[in-house]
Structures are given as C-alpha cells and as structure tokens.
C-alpha cells in the first residue's frame, strides 16, 4: 500500500524528471546516459556546451576589459590629482606674487608721502632753499610723479585684490 508521503515523493520525482533526447522517456535530470535507450544525453561537443563556453569566454573578456578600464581610471585620477596639486601651487605662487606687489606699492606710497611731508618740516627747508639745485628739485619731482603715476595704475588694476 502506498502512503501519502510515498505518493508525494513520487509526484516530486516525476515533476523533476526530464525527457530523454532520443527516446523521450522520463529520466533523472542529471542522467548522462538514458536508462531506457542507453544513449548519451550530453556530450561536451553539444551546441549548448559551445554556448556555455562562449559565455564563459565573454565573461572573462568582460572582466579583462573591466580591469583595464579600472586601471585606466585609477591612473587618470592619479594624473588629475597631480594636476590639481600643480594648480594649487600655481595659485599659491600667484598669491605670493600679488602679496609682494602689494607690499612694493605700499612702500612706494609711503615714499611718496614722506617726500611730500619733508619739505613742510624744518629739515626739509633745504628742499625749498638754495641747497637743492634746480635740476635736483626737478629730478625729485619727476621721480615722485612717476611713483605716483605707477601707484595710480596699480590702484586702478590690482590693488582691489590686495589682502
Ligand atoms: Zn532514451
């Protein structure tokens, strides 16, 4: 007598069986040789195996390409970080140049102010008096005017960037 459990096992077994490629009898899905007609079920040279081999090779090639892409990506990001570093250095150098320029023009401004104040002091009486020759006075004025003009140009262009 068949128990319910045995009947269930039988149903499960039947449901998972496959058909023989040659005689169409139900055989186990893992069977290499048919139990009924003794013919081989799956050879290595079956078309589906070729397909599987092709899939495997495609997968390997894909992984290879992915690897190449990743190494390119990492060397690209390395190059980009080097470029970023170089850019930072350029920006820092520009900042220092500007700072130096600002310092020079600040100094020039002070020189001009001193030159203008001296004649108004007792010590500066020499400037106004006969001790300073006409040529020297003209030279002093020329130099001061040139400084003033350069300071004026700097104020129009770069001075707003000064820290
Ligand atoms: Zn068979």
Image: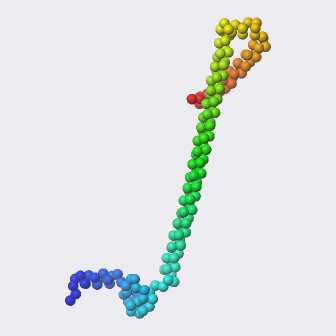
In the image, residue 86 above or below residue 26: above
Front residue of 62/92: it is: 92
Q: How many dots with numbers?
A: 0
Residue 39 image-quadrant placement: bottom left
Rendered location of residue 162, percent (x, y): 59, 29
Residue 96 lies, with reference to residue 13, above or below; the image says above
118 to 33, vertically: above or below:
above
Quadrant, the C terminus = top right
By what rule are the colours in the image chosen?
rainbow
Residue occupying the point 36% across, 87% down: 26
Task: Say which residue appears at 75% left-offset and 10% top-offset.
Answer: 132
| Residue at image coords 20%, 89% | 1
- Work out whether residue 136 can be spotted: yes
x then y, percent, for residue 145: 71, 19
Q: Position of residue 15 (x, y in %)?
A: 33, 82
Q: Is residue 158 visible?
A: no
Residue 11 sits in quarter: bottom left
Q: Residue at coordinates 62% horizontally, 40% vertically from top-left?
A: 90
> Which quadrant holds residue 158?
top right
**What residue occupies the far bottom of the structure in this picture?**
37
132, above or below 39, in the image: above
The residue lying toward the viewer, choosing from 19 and 38, is: 38
């Amino acid at each position: 007598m068949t128990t319910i459990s045995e009947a269930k096992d039988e149903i499960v077994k039947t449901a998972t069986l496959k058909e023989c490629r040659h005689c169409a009898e139900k055989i186990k899905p893992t069977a290499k040789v048919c139990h009924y007609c003794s013919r081989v079920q799956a050879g290595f040279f079956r078309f589906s195996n070729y397909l599987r081999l092709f899939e495997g090779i495609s997968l390997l090639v894909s992984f290879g390409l992915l690897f190449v892409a990743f190494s390119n990506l990492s060397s690209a990001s390395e190059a980009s970080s080097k470029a970023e570093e170089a850019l930072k250095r350029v920006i820092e150098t520009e900042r220092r140049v500007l700072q130096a320029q600002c310092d020079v023009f600040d100094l020039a401004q002070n020189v001009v102010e001193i030159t203008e104040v001296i004649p108004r002091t007792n010590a500066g009486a020499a400037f106004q008096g006969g001790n300073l020759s006409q040529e020297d006075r003209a030279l002093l004025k020329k130099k001061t005017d040139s400084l003033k003009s350069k300071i004026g140009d700097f104020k129009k262009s770069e001075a707003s960037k000064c820290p």
